[in-house]
Amino acid sequence: MSKRVKVGIDFGATRIKMAFVGEKGGLSYRREISTPIDAKRSVLIDTIASSVREIIEESGFNKRDIIGIGIGVPGPVDSKRGVIRYLPNIKGWKGVALRSILQTKLGIKVALDNDVNAMTLGEYRFGSGKGARNLVCLTLGTGVGGGIIINGEIYRGSTMCAGEVGHIPINEKGPKCNCRGIACIERYIGNRYIIEQARMVFRKGITLEDLTDLARSGNKDAKRIWEDVGEKLGVALTGVVNLLNPDRIVIGGGVSNAGELILRPLRRGIKIRAMKDQALHVKIVRGKLGDNAGIVGASLLVG
Amino acid sequence: MSKRVKVGIDFGATRIKMAFVGEKGGLSYRREISTPIDAKRSVLIDTIASSVREIIEESGFNKRDIIGIGIGVPGPVDSKRGVIRYLPNIKGWKGVALRSILQTKLGIKVALDNDVNAMTLGEYRFGSGKGARNLVCLTLGTGVGGGIIINGEIYRGSTMCAGEVGHIPINEKGPKCNCRGIACIERYIGNRYIIEQARMVFRKGITLEDLTDLARSGNKDAKRIWEDVGEKLGVALTGVVNLLNPDRIVIGGGVSNAGELILRPLRRGIKIRAMKDQALHVKIVRGKLGDNAGIVGASLLVG
């Protein structure tokens, strides 16, 4: 039995996913549950802890076989101290020292970080980011999240808030964003804004999956909506590419399932708008780990 | 006589400035000449070399007293190999190994980098950037240049092109930039665009100094032009602040002589538009080293 196994936990506002992660990024004993978002915090923490105990039991691993547990959470984290600053979509988590709480409950070393940083690490080590030195990873979903790797390490910024690609403005004037900003890229391509856009065009409710299917079957209106998403993202990423001169940009998250429908206009935008050196060098690719990026990445938080 | 003296050279497209720089950033034997921009490259290099020889002679220093010579040049540089990629405003400098050429001519160790990186280092070590860990330095002039310090070191990017704050787009649509981009911040606040704007408003040619004087004496049109510069820069820097979460942003360059006329609306823009954590943390300040930032910074290139 290997002594090199870690547990990765992707603690999302909707689902909690966890698994054992091997040395090469392979998953085993994966488990996924709904996040009991309305439960008390202590109940939610107990749910996580007992799920971990269950997969340990199921696996037959001994506690001593486990190097540690990494957990990515949906909000800003003081990763050095192992404390959650707050969770924008789950109330009552301000200043919670989740690392030490779980360590005490489980008797196993725990590491804590932001979920997007975890996902970024995952794609960097085992996914589409392999071999890059400087990388930006995006997750397109309800919001637009971002993580940055600089010289092979997660860059966290001065107050652990770096990487907010979603809140780069793409216009001087425009719609107000949730973050209180104006014309942030997220305010145009967060999933509900795409859905809103599609509802206006098709005059009925339509899912992103439907929109993708329609576009793939040649519907021009649907294609145009995805093109617009790619072009707008291209404006925000032109700034990122010119500023950071990265090797690679990795695009993940549910909205990125539209794949080339977004990536083609996005790459064209960078090619047209970004500075030549930077544009020629950067590769823009889809994430490889999909739904498991957060689990794999979280396990990598453990040193 | 100190053994710890360095020479810093700020090689600009208009002026070449150099001086001895002491351990605490103090200058001595400063010399400034016009850049013989139409001369052959070899003549220009000889001009630099003989100026260095002259200040050495003048100073009475022995060659062995000089740790090394640092030189900042106006264009992208492969700082590891000591080679100029090209100089956008001086023809005939593509791929020139200036470091080894000067080393051979002078018999002193030479270090080479981009002028904005040099200036950024200067402000970081001896100017308004002191004490910061993550810093962005801007130079507002003909163009808008930028340098980045990450965890105390110059961040150069994957192909040594990082830091191009001037080419962050602030609108989806807008005027075409020299860099081939669209609606780059430089295209709005590069000095000639400000002068153009002022000419349109005042219906006569007007210098930036006049524009500053007018604004300071209460002229509303002049104040409005500077406010607009600060607000537009605030849009671009909102993206930078949200993405990099720096401690400090240092603003230098000739256009920054307008001081608070730009900085006040800029700070207000960041306060209103950037994410709360990032906005509360970052300090936006004027450069302290002024015209000497490039010389001081170049000397710091020498290890």
Image (spheres, coloured by chain):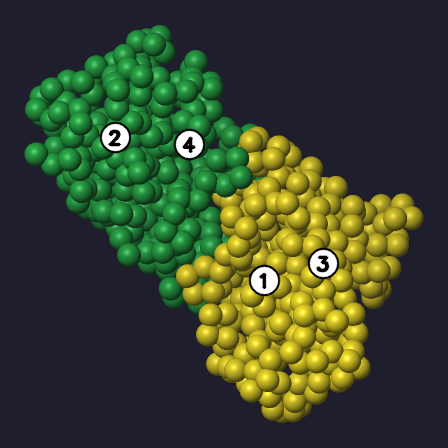
Chain colours: A yellow, B green
Q: Would residue B78 appear left or right of B254 to someone viewing this image?
A: right
What chain does badge 1 belong to?
A
Q: Nearer the viewer, mark 4 or mark 2?
A: 2
Is tag 4's residue or tag 2's residue first in the polypeptide sequence?
2
**What residue is disc 3 on?**
A24
**What residue is disc 2 on?**
B68
Asked whether the beta carbons under mark 2 and mark 3 sit within 8 Å of each other, the answer is no
Gap between marks 4 and 2 measured at Cα: 15 Å
Q: Nearer the viewer, mark 3 or mark 4?
A: 3
Hey, what amino acid is under mark 2?
A: Gly
**What residue is disc 1 on?**
A117
Gap between marks 1 and 2 measured at Cα: 41 Å
Placement of the C terminus of chain B among the 4 image quadrants: top left
Asked whether the beta carbons under mark 1 and mark 4 sit within 8 Å of each other, the answer is no
Residue B79, labelled with which disc?
A: 4
Hey, what amino acid is under mark 3?
A: Lys
Element at label 4: loop
* Label 1 crowd bin: few (<14), some (14–19), many (20+), radius 10 Å: many
Gap between marks 1 and 4 measured at Cα: 30 Å
* Label 2 crowd bin: few (<14), some (14–19), many (20+), radius 10 Å: many
Please tell me which residue is depicted at 62% across the width and 32% down the height of the picture. Answer: A280
- For residue A229, say whether it is visible: no
Residue B75, labelled with which disc?
A: none
Element at label 2: strand
Q: Where is A273 relative to B82, above or below?
A: below
